[in-house]
Amino acid sequence: MRIPLILSILVATSAERMNVRNLTPEKAGLMHTDAFNQLTEIYRDKQPESELELMMEVSKIMEDYCEIDDAGCKSLAYESTLREFHAGSKGPREITYSESMHGGVKQSLEKMFKTLHDIDVDNLNEIVDTLNEISKDISTHDIADPLSKAVGVATVSLAIESSKLWHTVHIGSEHHPLKNLLPKNRRKLQSIMSDFTNEQLFGPAVVVYNVVLADVTSGLANGSNMMNAAGTTSAEALIAWAPVSVIAVTYFAIPASVNAATRAAANFAGAVISIVTPGAGISIPPKP
């Protein structure tokens, strides 16, 4: 990971613009939702021609959250998209935490992952209610440092909005545009491994879980990278780094979610996609 480049980009984005620089941890998921609403409109009546086209559209969406003259912020939009599409091609990302993350926040995030594992066709409201409680527990923790809280709340915010989005796509809507996000050139090359799709074999909740998991693990990993880069326990420094980490969580989660969605879209091309098993650090049984 090119920490120096990302640091220089993020530090340069001072708190001036509402969407990116004034993004609070609680609203990180709302930017995620807004980005996917835009992507839905772009592909409402068509498929992406190629993965490159899809990457460019995602980058442009995130670039639009930057000020016109903010080259650093725009660079981050493209940097994060390239990195996450590349990382997604290697398979599931492991769940990782910063060594400096407060133990109480980590425990809350472990509860978040276990809650996501339970997502099903009929329990979205229950899942969202539990995630909101977890977010409140993190934000009101009386000992955790501000940086741990910021990364934790931003990650849970992503989990909430991502769960609602992909539950709607794969369960609540019969013909949602994001179901068909597989680029045409990948569709042509897709090998047919079975006459049955994962959705037919395991149910649509498995697809929802896999895409949400990719989204949230990416956001947490990059928020944790920023925590590691902060390298100080100074209260002033931790407070200053908090908004930087929220940006990192959001800007890397969005393209990771898009990449996972293209893999999920293989269902509708007639192929079986791999089922994600949560990574190291916590014990969660694989989705059946």
Image (cartoon, rainbow, N blue to C red):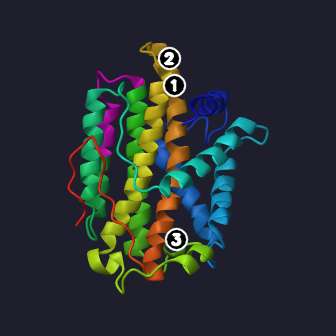
**Residue 33: % across, % down:** 51, 56
Q: Which residues are magenta?
A: 132-146
Say which residue label 3 marks: 178
Residue contact between numbered discs 1 and 2, judged by CB atoms under 8 Å: yes
| Front residue of this view, candidates 65 and 199 | 199
| Front residue of this view, candidates 145 and 18 | 145
Between marks 3 and 2, how big is the CA–CA gap?
A: 40 Å
Q: Amino acid at mark 2?
A: Ala
Q: Find residue 273 and report its image quarter.
A: bottom left
**Residue 66: % across, % down:** 69, 43
Residue visible at 68% across and 58% down in the picture: 56
Residue 37 in the image: above or below residue 139: below
Say which residue label 2 marks: 237
The image's mark for residue 42 is: none
Q: Residues within 10 Å of mark 2 (few under 14, many from 20)?
A: some
Say which residue label 1 marks: 241
Relative placement, left or right, of 244 versus 99 is: right
Residue visible at 26% across and 57% down in the picture: 117
| Front residue of this view, candidates 141 and 241 | 241
User: Looking at this rendering, what residue extends furthest in the bottom direction?
Assistant: 195
